Amino acid sequence: GVPPIGKYEECTMRCAFVVCALALTSNTLAFLPLPSSTPILSLRSGASSSRSRASVSVRKDGMSMVAVVPNSAFEQNFLAEASTLSMGSKAYVQSMNKLFPGAIAEEKFIECMSSVCFEKGFNCSNSINLVSTCRDEICRPFAEQLDSLWGESFNIASLAGFVFCGKTGFGAGMAHSPQEDDTGKERYIFWVAPHVAYGPDDAPVGKIWRPGRESISSACGALIAFNNELSSGADVSLELDPTDTEMSLVRSQVRAKLKTTHGDKAPNLVGVTYAAHDCILETVKRTAKMAAPKTAEYIIVSGIQVHGALNKNFWWPGSVTHYEYNAKGTQVETDLSEQFVAKVGDYKAANWLEAEALAHMQKTAGKSRVQGFFSDIIGKV
């Protein structure tokens, strides 16, 4: 059996929980008393925009102190972005829209696309999502948000957001949805996208700051590597490398797509990302049609996930298409993009981003408060 928790262990657990709360809700310096034998903590929040770390130091009087401190290079750049964007983010959003027209906040994208699906009769009780974004951890919040709204999803993701599970994988995923009692109908929604980073003006396309790293990082690493191969002018190997299978397939598919759109001219990273989107969408359309039973009704949602300023994710909406078999057994394809545009309405990404930046600046200045749930725990420690 599990030994009972004593008062000391309970206190330690409470304090550790409070540290987690502070690390998630504050970027300012904060101190809390802990038992002196509490091990040093190193905490990093999830995929939120303000990731901090917590450390423990021991004073001369033996009292341990927890300090929630900024994550140097990452947090310094984050604060610089927040300071600039809190005074106006229109220029940044306009520059992003030149490359990714109509890009909106990830939350808004999910909200509007889901609303379109709801109106076609899809809901969390009768549908299952099949999702493919890159394996990169900065892509994961998208699937997590979808799951919180729709329920658990079926993972069809590979490197760079490509879909390599084939008709066997699709056949498995498209055999899990609840079936209607009278018709046997089953419903599926595909959400697929490559990704790319697009920071402020001083950060090139593809560059992003990550917590705990002192130098700037990149996204999507696979597409950047391929773009560098093209830019070098050297011959790009299209042979299948068994030690790098997925990258070999990415390289082969994107190169073939670029040959038809750009010839021998090497595009930039944005062009490579759009080509990746088209490859992914074509693969999903083709494979879903092969794997779907005649009783299946499904929607394919595509786009490009853009990791923007303040560590906020945006989405360029690529397409949303509904597929269903009619009484004659013919598959009918319906474009739902107009319905999506109507759902977005007069939404302004610049206004949203500016508000997010201002909220962060206020929190950094100590104007926010710990949420009531956490406040109650702090009061009991």
Image: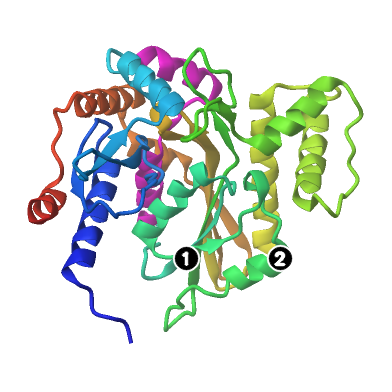
- Give the structural element (helix, strand or loop) at label 2: helix
- Point out residue 347 in the picture as x, y percentages from the top left corner: 31, 29
- Point out residue 274 in the picture as x, y percentages from the top left corner: 64, 32
- Point out residue 246 in the picture as x, y percentages from the top left corner: 75, 50
Contact, mark 1 vs mark 2 (Cβ under 8 Å): no
Residues packed near mark 1 inside 10 Å, few (<14), some (14 to 19) or many (20 plus)? many
In this orientation, does residue 305 appear? Answer: yes
Q: CA distance from mark 1 to mark 2?
A: 17 Å
Which badge, 1 or 2, comes first in the chain's sequence?
1
What residue does disc 1 label?
128
- Give the structural element (helix, strand or loop) at label 1: strand
In this orientation, does residue 121 appear? Answer: no
The amino acid sitting under disc 2 is Lys
Q: Residue sitting at 42 percent across and 26 percent down?
A: 72
Q: Residue sitting at 53 percent across and 17 percent down?
A: 203
Figure check: 251 above or below 13 = above
What residue does disc 2 label?
167
**Residue 231 colored in magenta in the image:** no
Find residue 358 and report its image quarter. top left
The amino acid sitting under disc 1 is Ile
Describe residue 98's horizontal placement relative to residue 33 as left or right. Answer: right
Nearer to me, 183 or 379? 379
Find residue 105 and report its image quarter. top left
Q: Which corner quadrant holds the N terminus?
A: bottom left
Q: Residue sitting at 34 percent across and 22 percent down?
A: 79
Magenta extent: 90-119
Residue furthest bottom as drawn? 1
Total tally of numbered discs in the picture? 2
- Point out residue 112 in the picture as x, y percentages from the top left corner: 36, 44
**Residue 104 colored in magenta in the image:** yes
* Colour scheme shown: rainbow
Q: Residue sitting at 39 percent across and 64 percent down?
A: 151
